[in-house]
Amino acid sequence: MAETARPHVICHMTSSVDGRIKTRRWGIDADGHYETVHARLDGDAWMCGRVTMQGYADSATPLAAPPADDGPVPREDHVARRDASGYAVALDAKGRLDWGARNEITGDHVVVVLTEAVPDAHLRRLRAGGQSYLFAGTETIDFALAVEKLGRLFGIARLLVESGGGLNGSMLRAGVIDELSLLLAPAVDGLRGTPAVFDVDGTEADSLGAKRRLELRSCETLSGGVVWLRYRVAAA
């Protein structure tokens, strides 16, 4: 396969006007617009973190038999399929998700992003289950490397990041998010401690406001008072 440039990365989220993302408790239907815009963004892969992906893994069919322990497994990327129509990318640094025999989500091939800290037994299970995996870091995820490998190994050109504030914030801080697609719902959450679109740990000096600049590309009013905002992300 010819070398491919890293994907264009779009963070696609729904939030209340105060930036919170717990949509189910607002008493409005935000999911319909989310899926419609997801399709309009025309990504060939979507990415979520371990917590978001847990439900998909929990519903997997178990492996028919545990894979044999045939010695150490080299820390080399494993591409089970590179011709899928779409890819579901799971970030799972420590290898905690058990995918069993499930190697796709609604037709999108499962690709797991790991660190080299995962046990050999987990790699054997992924191989036996038909999932692809790649390594991006020794103990913590190197987001720039992960995104580059997704383009090079799978030909992914347009990646949608649809996760929680922690992962979104880490990727924004790492400089790998190119665009923000934000559906602003006509709701106020207001509860302290509720996850936001972007969350990072640290002090005031760690705020991303002085490091990343958002340039408005478009603004579209949708039904039900939802506003779709698209921003280009640039270094400040």
Image: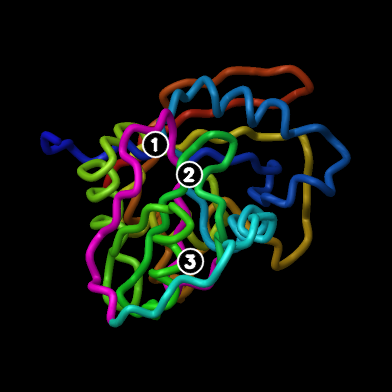
Q: Looking at the image, do the residues carrying marks 2 and 1 touch, with CB atoms under 8 Å apart? A: no
Q: Earlier in the sequence, mark 3 or mark 1?
A: 1
Q: Estimate the x, y position of residue 218 in percent, counting from the top left.
A: 47, 21
Which residue does the numbered mark 1 point to in the structure image?
A: 179
**Amino acid on which the number 2 mark rests in the picture:** Ala
User: Label for residue 200?
Assistant: 3
**Amino acid on which the number 1 mark rests in the picture:** Glu
Q: Looking at the image, do the residues carrying marks 3 and 2 touch, with CB atoms under 8 Å apart? A: no
Q: Quadrant of residue 165?
A: bottom right
Please tell me whether residue 94 belongs to the stretch shown in magenta: yes
Tell me the quarter of the image containing the N terminus: top left
Q: Is residue 1 above or below residue 200?
A: above
Which residue does the numbered mark 2 point to in the structure image?
A: 88
Judge by depth and name the residue closer to the eye, 132 or 196: 132
Secondary structure under tag 3 reads loop
Judge by depth and name the residue closer to the eye, 148 or 221: 148
Q: Estimate the x, y position of residue 150 in percent, counting from the top left.
A: 29, 46
Q: Is residue 93 above or below residue 22?
A: below
Please tell me whether residue 73 belongs to the stretch shown in magenta: yes
Instruction: State which region is magenta.
Output: 72-97
The residue depicted at 63 percent of the width and 62 percent of the height is 62
Q: Quadrant of residue 160?
A: top left
User: What residue occupies the far right of the structure in this picture?
Assistant: 27
Q: Nearer the viewer, mark 2 or mark 1?
A: 2
